[in-house]
Image (tube, helix red, strand yellow):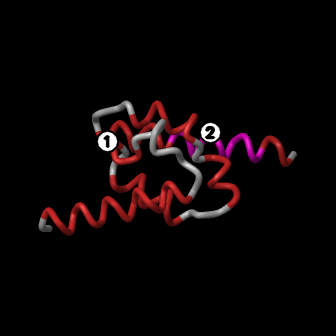
């Protein structure tokens, strides 16, 4: 992929994430691996907006290792699903 295309793709991801209510000043979404950015953009729902807050994602953006980011992100989703099940009982 050419640099221009990569920049264009990253910019579109950034704009989409901002539209989901994530502050570009506080959260550097470009530090999230591509898989996480794509997942967040593709799950644009009320539930995902409540789950993927800046506060919850901030620690993940600080992780440099992309595989570890994915692991922590998956754990966030698992924890959220467990809490939702407990609240529904």
Q: Residue at x 49, y 56 (%)?
A: 17
Find the residue positioned furthest to the right. Answer: 89
Question: Marks 2/1: CA distance?
Answer: 18 Å
Q: Main secondary structure of the magenta part?
A: helix
Find the residue positioned furthest to the left. Answer: 2
Span of residues in magenta: 75-85
| Position above or below: 12 against 88 | below
Does label 2 or label 1 sit earlier along the sequence?
Answer: 1
Q: Are marks 2 and 1 in contact (CB under 8 Å)?
A: no
On the rendered structure, is 43 left or right of 64? right
Q: Residue at x 34, y 60 (%)?
A: 11
Query: Label 1: few (<14), some or many (≥20) within 10 Å?
Result: few
Q: Secondary structure at mark 1?
A: helix
The label on residue 10 is none
Quarter location, residue 71 = top left
User: Toward the viewer: 59 or 84?
Assistant: 59
**Residue under pointer 2:** 79
Q: Residue at x 34, y 55 (%)?
A: 34
Image location (x, y in percent) of residue 57: 51, 39
Image location (x, y in percent) of residue 74: 49, 45
Q: Residue at x 87, y 45 (%)?
A: 89
The label on residue 67 is 1
User: Toward the viewer: 17 or 42?
Assistant: 17
Quarter location, residue 55 = top right
Q: Quadrant of the N terminus?
A: bottom left
Q: Tally the numbered discs.
A: 2
């Amino acid at each position: 992929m050419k640099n221009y295309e990569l920049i264009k793709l990253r910019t579109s991801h950034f704009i989409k994430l901002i539209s989901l209510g994530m502050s570009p000043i506080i959260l550097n979404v470009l530090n999230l691996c591509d898989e996480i950015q794509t997942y967040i953009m593709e799950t644009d729902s009320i539930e995902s907006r409540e789950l993927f807050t800046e506060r919850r994602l901030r620690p993940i953006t600080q992780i440099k290792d992309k595989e570890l980011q994915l692991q922590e992100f998956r754990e966030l989703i698992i924890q959220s699903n467990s809490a939702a099940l407990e609240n529904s009982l």
